[in-house]
Image (cartoon, rainbow, N blue to C red):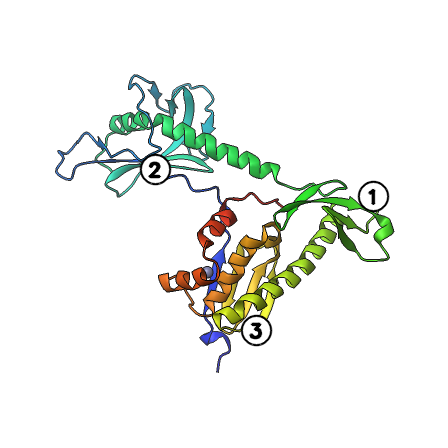
Amino acid sequence: MGVGSLIQLAFDWLDSAPAPAKPAPSLTASPTASPTPTPAVSPAPDNSPTHTPKSAVVIKARTALPEPHYKHPRANRQACLAQTWVAYEFKRARRRTIGFLVDADGLVVRAPKWVTIAEMESALQEKAVWVVRKLQEVQERQRQLAGARITWRDGVSFPYMGQQLVLRLDPSQQHARPAVVLGDTLCLGLSQSASPEQIRDAVQAWLMTQAREHFVARLNHYAPLLGVSWRKLSLSNAGTRWGSAKSDGSIRLNWRLLHFKPSVIDYVVAHELSHLRVMNHSPAFWDTVKTLVPDFDAQRSALRDELLPVW
Ligand SMILES: [Zn+2]
């Protein structure tokens, strides 16, 4: 009998994308509208844009234009929104409304075929302040992410179990243990001339040892509470998911979770163990998680929103 065929697998993807923008406001057309209806503005969400004067300039991309402040990589149009030049991607789509999407790439506007360019542009002006605010937020987050890349050297700090650990290179440690934590300092038994790669590898090796120890302790804490037993733990490496569970009881957890505070790690451990009871993300699954981590929603948000260092 094939070994893996009966094994179900639950993957839990790392959500490393910028926090999703609040649902983009859309302009809703009445279903009974005439062939070129004037789109009506849908009820404003709480962060809805304020309306700007419609006299704002909108120029097609081929004209000589100022360098846009925000530019989508597939930009095919450009507009001045709330005094900010934005080059955006415009697409025709099979949809009933005009949609605005802001993500790490920039602004995408989608509109159904029957909406004229002038109507689309006018709708965009109506949402100008909202769009520019979202573009600013996304850019700020990208900037923070870029700043989170660690340069591995003596004195650098990085998050460990929700606190900052300062790294010290201390060759005198070499013969005792490769690494030891003293207060908020991680002492590595490496010389000051160690290369960033050597330092990074040493920190990673230490983190992986800590991760295994901590994960096993937490798995053993939660498993009996759910009446499940786990069989095998593997550490995943720099992948794009936090964890996975197989119905045969094997659990995989990302060692980078050790950057988070213990309550967040507990949520991921509880999540994977809960998959040994419910192998999907149905309401029954979340009810199971909740018995272990009542405030799992908050932990889940922290997992998604906190900025982790880039290795
Ligand atoms: Zn899951």
**Separation of residues labelled 1 and 3 (CA atoms):** 42 Å
Q: Is residue 209 above or below residue 246?
A: above
Which residue in the structure is indicated by mark 2? 24
Q: Which of marks 1 and 3 is in front?
A: 3
Which residue in the structure is indicated by mark 1? 192
**Separation of residues labelled 1 and 2 (CA atoms):** 51 Å
Residue 22: quadrant of the picture: top left
Which residue in the structure is indicated by mark 3? 231
- Asked if marks 1 and 3 touch (Cβ < 8 Å), the reply is no
Name the residue located 29 percent from the left edge and 16 percent from the top edge: 55
Q: Which amino acid does label 2 sit on?
A: Ala
SS state under label 2:
loop
Q: In this view, does 211 lie above or below 30?
A: below
User: Neighbour class for label 1 at 10 Å: few (<14), some, many (≥20)?
Assistant: few
User: Neighbour class for label 2 at 10 Å: few (<14), some, many (≥20)?
Assistant: some
Q: In this view, does 172 lie above or below 144?
A: below
Name the residue located 48 percent from the left edge and 62 percent from the top edge: 292
SS state under label 1:
loop
Mark found first going from the N terminus, 2 or 3:
2
Q: Which amino acid does label 1 sit on?
A: Gln
Residue 183 lies left or right of residue 242; in this view the side is right
User: Neighbour class for label 3 at 10 Å: few (<14), some, many (≥20)?
Assistant: few
Mark found first going from the N terminus, 1 or 3:
1
Name the residue located 59 percent from the left edge and 71 percent from the top edge: 232
Q: Where is residue 110 in the image (x, y as percent from the top left)?
A: 31, 37
Mark found first going from the N terminus, 1 or 2:
2
- The answer to which of 224 and 238 lies nearer the viewer is 224
Q: Residue 175 carries which label?
A: none
- Asked if marks 2 and 3 touch (Cβ < 8 Å), the reply is no
Q: Which amino acid does label 3 sit on?
A: Arg
Q: Where is residue 146 in the image (x, y as percent from the top left)?
A: 59, 37
